[in-house]
Amino acid sequence: MPEVIFNGPEGRLEGRYQPAKKKGAPIAIVLHPHPQFGGTMNNQIVYQLFYTFLDRGFSVLRFNFRGVGRSEGVFDHGTGELSDAAAALDWMQAVNPDARSCWIAGVSFGAWIGMQLLMRRPEIEGFVSIAAMANRYDFSFLAPCPSSGLFVHGDKDRVAPVNEVISVIDKVKVQKGVKLDHAVIEGANHFFENRVDQLVDTVGGYLDRRLGIVKD
């Protein structure tokens, strides 16, 4: 898998990029959990999401936010990380000028960043938010949410309890034609320990439905 270094707002950002085999393929970016709690682009869920998109014909990028791994800069409590994500999308679009669509996926802290990027970039047509901490971060900026997507939670999540998350998401207004899907993984905690396979199956099934992929 090609290692890539691209320019971010505070210096170089380190990533892993895999292009699709077909020209004009859609692009996807996967954002990792909180940098100050061990989150990196090598997080197991991030890694699995990366290949979930790749297996469905996407060109995919995962990268380290500023101050993580070989990415330059220091943690900026979300503001700078949102700028990093925007720079990553700019880089992906420059490398894939013929991409027909764009998706964003994020895990925990990365889900919060991803949804903010969604509001700023109208070309993002789909999203996957895993373990979004709607109880800790303000999601009221989704007013209205411009794109359809999937929220996935674990019913044993004590960091972001599923009931609190769903109650916040249910208040989000959507644009006409936009649908927000919820999926709850039984027995899963915030990190989906021993439940990553179910998580991947859930996300993969959602993507198949959205993309019109028929499995044998």
Image (tube, grey):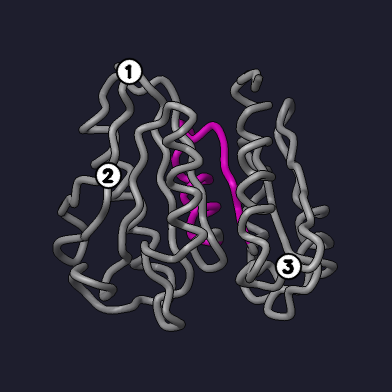
Query: Badge 1, how many Cα within 10 Å: few under 14, some, many 20+?
Result: few
- Disc 3 target residue: 188
Say which of marks 3 and 2 sits in front.
3
SS at circle 3: loop
Q: Is residue 36 left or right of residue 190?
A: left
**Cα–Cα gap, marks 3 and 2:** 29 Å
What type is the residue that disc 1 sits on?
Answer: Lys
Identify which residue, 88 or 191, lies in the foreground: 191
Residue 141 percent location from the top left of the image: 61, 56
Give the numbered dot on residue 17: 2
Residue 147 at x, y percent in the picture: 61, 35
Q: How many marks?
A: 3
Q: Earlier in the sequence, mark 3 or mark 1?
A: 1
Which residue bears the numbered disc 1? Answer: 22
Q: Secondary structure at mark 2?
A: strand
175 vs 106, left or right, is: right
User: Residue 188: x, y in percent?
Assistant: 73, 67
Is 74 above or below relative to 101? below
Q: In whole angstroms, how far apart are the C-alphas of marks 3 and 1?
A: 36 Å
Residue 90, disc:
none
Instruction: State which tag comes first along the sequence, 1 or 2.
Output: 2
Q: Give the position of the C terminus as an image quadrant.
A: top right
In magenta, the rendered stretch is 112-130
